[in-house]
Amino acid sequence: DIVLTQSPGTLSLSPGERATLSCRASQSVSTRYLAWYQQKPGQAPKLLIFGASSRATGIPDRFSASGSGTDFTLTISRLEPEDFAVYYCQHYGNSPLWTFGHGTKVEAK
Amino acid sequence: QLQLQESGPGLVKPSETLSLTCGVSGGSISGSYSYWGWVRQPPGKGLEWIATLYHSGDTYYNPSHKSRVTISVDMSKNQFSLKVNSVTAADTAIYYCVRGPYHFDDWGQGSRVTVSS
C-alpha cells in the first residue's frame, strides 16, 4: 500500500509569511494523480491543486505546488488570515485507490 | 453549480447498519466525469476514502472496509448511497459524499454519524 507522509505536522507562522508543506510518498507516484486540499474547521475539504501543480477553479495564485516521484510541495507565498487551516495531500492509483496524507495544520503564530 | 447533499441518521447502534444517501443537484449523476464516492473523517482525525462508483455500475472499495461496505446508485432519483454493516464505535465520523475520478472536485457538507447504544 502507498503511504503519504506529510510534514511538518504543524506549521506556526504569521500572516504574510511563506508556508512550505511537504508530502512524501512511500513509492514513486504519477504527478497526474497527486492533489492537495484545504480544510477549515467545521467545513468540508476543498480542492486546491490537482495534477501536482494545477490550481483548481477560483484558487488564488498565492497557492502553488510542485514535485515529482516521491516528493511534493505545496507553497503558500504570503499567508492570508483565511489560509490558516489543515492541508491534505491525496493520491489516486494504488491500494487503496484513493489515499490521503495525515495532514499539516497551518496555525497562526 | 453541482451540489452534493448527504442525508442519514445521526445516531446508529453498534452492530446495526449505517445507511447514508447523497443527493446530487445541478447535474446528472449519469453525466460525464461521473465518479461518485464517500470519504469519512473520524473526530479530530484525517480523511479516509471508503468507496466510489462509476455510474455504469463499476464499484471500488477501500480494502480495509470492503467486507462491510456497499455503494450503490439510483439514477432515477439522481442520488447514490452508502451502507456500512456491523458498525462499531470506530465508524463514528463525518461522512462526506464526493465527486471525481482521480481527485475530489466537489464535496457535500458532511453528515455526522455517531455509533452508540
Image (tube, coloured by chain):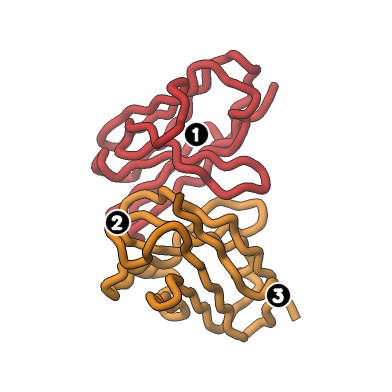
Tag 1 secondary structure: strand
User: What chain is the orange one?
Assistant: B
Tag 2 secondary structure: loop
Give the alpha-carbon distance from disc 2 to disc 1, as whole Å: 32 Å
Residue type for callout 3:
Leu
Vertically, is A105 above or below B76? Answer: above
Mark toward the viewer: 2 or 1: 2
**Chain letter for the residue marked with disc 1 in the picture:** A
Q: Residues within 10 Å of mark 1 (few under 14, many from 20)?
A: some
> Mark 3 highlights which residue?
B11
Vertically, is A99 above or below A69? Answer: below
Residue type for callout 1:
Ser
> Mark 1 highlights which residue?
A7
> Mark 2 highlights which residue?
B33
Residue type for callout 2:
Tyr
Image coordinates of residue B21 in percent, x first then y, are 53, 72
**Chain letter for the residue marked with disc 2 in the picture:** B
Give the alpha-carbon distance from disc 3 to disc 2, as whole Å: 33 Å
How many numbered circles does the render carry?
A: 3
